[in-house]
Image (cartoon, coloured by chain):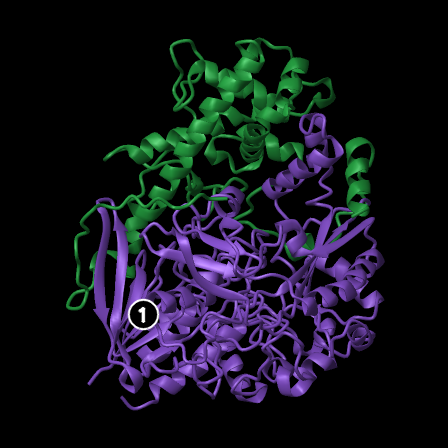
Chain colours: A purple, B green
Amino acid sequence: MTRKAVVVGSGAGGSFAAMELAQAGWEVVVFEKGPSHFSNLGGEGPIGTLFSNDDLKMNVRYFAGPDPEVFPRTWRSVGASAAQYTGSVNDLPQLVGGGTVHWDAKVPRFWDIDFQQLSALGPTPGADMADWPFSYADIAPYYDEVEQLIGVQGDVTAMPDAVLKHAPRGAFPMPPGPQQRSSLVVAAGATAVGMHPFPYPMAINSVPYHGQHVCNDCGFCSGYGCPVVARPAALMPLRAALRTGRVSLVPETMVTSVQLAGSGAAARATGVRWMRMTPGGPVTGRESADVVVMAASAIETVRLALLSGFPDASGKLGRRLMMHSFIDGTAIFTDERMHAYRGRSITQCAQDTCDPDFPGARAFAKANGLPYIRGGNMELGGSQDPIEEGQSYQTLLGFVRSSRPFGTEFKQLMRSSILRDRLAGCQLIGNDMPYLDHTVTLDPTVKDVFGLPVAQVTWSTGKYEQVAQQFYIPLLKKMMTAAGAAVALAVPATTDSGGLPTGFHIMGGMMMGADPATSVTDAYGRVHGLDNVYVADGSAFVTSGAQNPTNTIMAVALRNMRHLAGTPA
Amino acid sequence: VSSNSDPEVSASWPEGDTSPGLPRRVVITAIPAAVASAAVIGASGCTSPAGPSGAPATRFFSSHQAAVIEDATARIAPGPNDDPAEAGHPGAREAGVTTYIDAMLGSLGVLNASAGGGTPMIFAGGPWSNRHTSGPDLMATFSALDPVTRMAWRKRLAGWQQQYATGIATLDKLAGGDFTKATPAEQDKILAKAEVGTFRSLLFEHTIEGMYSVPEYGGNHDLVGWKDISYPGDSQPRGYTSDEVEQSDGRDPVDDTGVVADVLKFLGGL
């Protein structure tokens, strides 16, 4: 008899879950909370889209959602206090394709020590460090398969030995595309201070690939949906899923609970309940399923588990939320324009500081009472667009022209373009420890448009992360100065955000593990205590690594769903 | 920062059951049709027909309110006639920032219309304008909003309409009755006052948007905002060549005097 799965979410994890189960003969219903801005998804040839080179639509007006007016979250820095903020809290896009719509498609792999951070590097005070239930060698074939399907550009011959030692790999499906001027300039600075930059692995087509367009370097990349769908990512497994004829993709519909029956060892899911807004008001319904796969992204999957009353024998459901500890670098060049509005954003990276043995790091850690610290992958280059640039000057004029913070000085700054055309960015994606008190809970008062409690995020920068930032901020400044920057500014991203987590990398809350006493899901993402409910997104992560997480989300989802597909009913 | 969500839900919700039959209307195969059904607003849709006086008709503002916003945004982003330092540099007036803001606020009426109200000017279409190539401007056909997004924008725009009505009244009051009768120097002093700080921030953000967003939203008229900052704007479907991406455009020192020097110094000291 045909088995039926409900998949919650159509992003990086849900798309691979739908493909894997449908290709194994399952009937699959994919619920996506947001709309679709694509056409021809299940057809032949190029996928169509409503995305465009539109700064306002993407960066100001929430075209990729979620709109915090109807789907807010709340945030607080520490538990046992009231929420300090209501609005967008590191929201990933909410639409068909999920987080692979707004991203600039960076797909580095995690390192071997990311999967064995406890056994390889030892415990860290205050953190709930653990190993993943598999190794880099176990997951590597799934990385290969993901990269072949979605299309990844890169140059293995340009990758430094240290990276290949920790994440060995073969050739990329396609070569790198043109390198952004801003990336090359900052990369030269990185080389000058002893680091080893190389072309950033990116899921962007540098050649025609699987019927989709080549990137034409329009420049509206990070934060934008691609107008020519040259970085389709999740849309490729979604297309493969839809082509089986066994998959229904249902947008604009929010799964509001996983329905559970039985108790104790017999507890299992019978289906899901959903809600959809219509012009006449909300409509509710249910969908039965043999298996429910949750892939709504780390925060929303935890929220759904809490709304559904999942068992929690380990006490870790919703704990160990990880965000990455970003350092924002700003290099300003006064003699030359960087024109980062051209090209796929940020084409160079450096992974030297992912290594706990980066020169000086061990000694600095020990001097601060820690066994080790790690930085993270550094994104070299890129800039911002005029609306965000203008907002930056609006803020700065409050400091340098407080008596009249507007007028001709604003326009002079816009013409100088020191924070756009003369800017090259540099971000360090810092390893974020799993802490038991960094959590997703249900907010006690704030509700979404459907009247359901929203996710309350409790997260702050821990001691390990602060020490790593203190060590690596001077390195970023040194690197940008070596690149020729007249001004080299580097601050923790939370300095600008008022403490709010930033960077759109969200992981944990439903950690995998072999032991039900110390983990929320098993070695294949199945929820302990519910034998037919799985997670297939970043919530299953055990550690945050020091890299952009999406490639790992997809590879782990593929591995776990293949296991599920091969499990007898 | 959003305030708490206030769901506009009906007391009794119709119950659907997808078990036997999914809601096929919204499965993915129907999406191209949904996209195609987006109401068409022509390229001129952002410019209103002329009113009786010859001034452009407005969607939300009264003629006086429009005049206050025109003056206030011209203080925030002055043009040649607003500040001698801006000779040769079009500002908010020339870019049509008031038209941009009015079109945005006026979209609430479109959202509230029960039927046949057209498509609000919230999300310009895609995937490109053909601005640098030949062909139709596909951004000029605004995208339809899904029901949840319509609710979000009704809430947001209702709040902004209220802030504008109150903010304009406050500017008038501080000017002794009519902000537009105040001298530019007096207008600057009023706008710099702490008591209008919140409204000024909102107006500043919307001025930035009206200056530098794609022109389909009603601002950045004739691309004057982009031209003034040497920015080409949207580049699809042309994109850039490898050389344009990789090569330096050559030495081009910034004029690092005045406020530019002060900002560089401020950032360097952080």
**Residue type at the position of mark 1:** Leu
Mark 1 chain: A
SS category of the residue bearing label 1: helix
Residue A184 seen from this side: yes
Q: Identify the residue at image location x=66%, y=38%.
A: A395
**Most distant residue in the bottom direction:** A568
Task: Name the foreground residue: A253 vs A175.
Answer: A253
Q: Is B246 on the left-hand or right-hand side of A194?
A: left
Q: Residue furthest left?
A: B20
The location of residue B248, given as percent across then percent down, is 76, 51
What residue sits 48% from the left and 62% below the top? A99
B203 in relation to A294, above or below: above
Where's residue A291, x and y in %?
Answer: 29, 78
* Residue at 83% in and 54% down: A484
Q: Position of residue B205 (x, y in %)?
A: 56, 35
Question: From the viewer's perspective, is residue A23 above or below residue A212?
Answer: below
Question: In which quarter of the view is residue A94 placed?
Answer: bottom left
The foreground one among B116 and A366 is A366
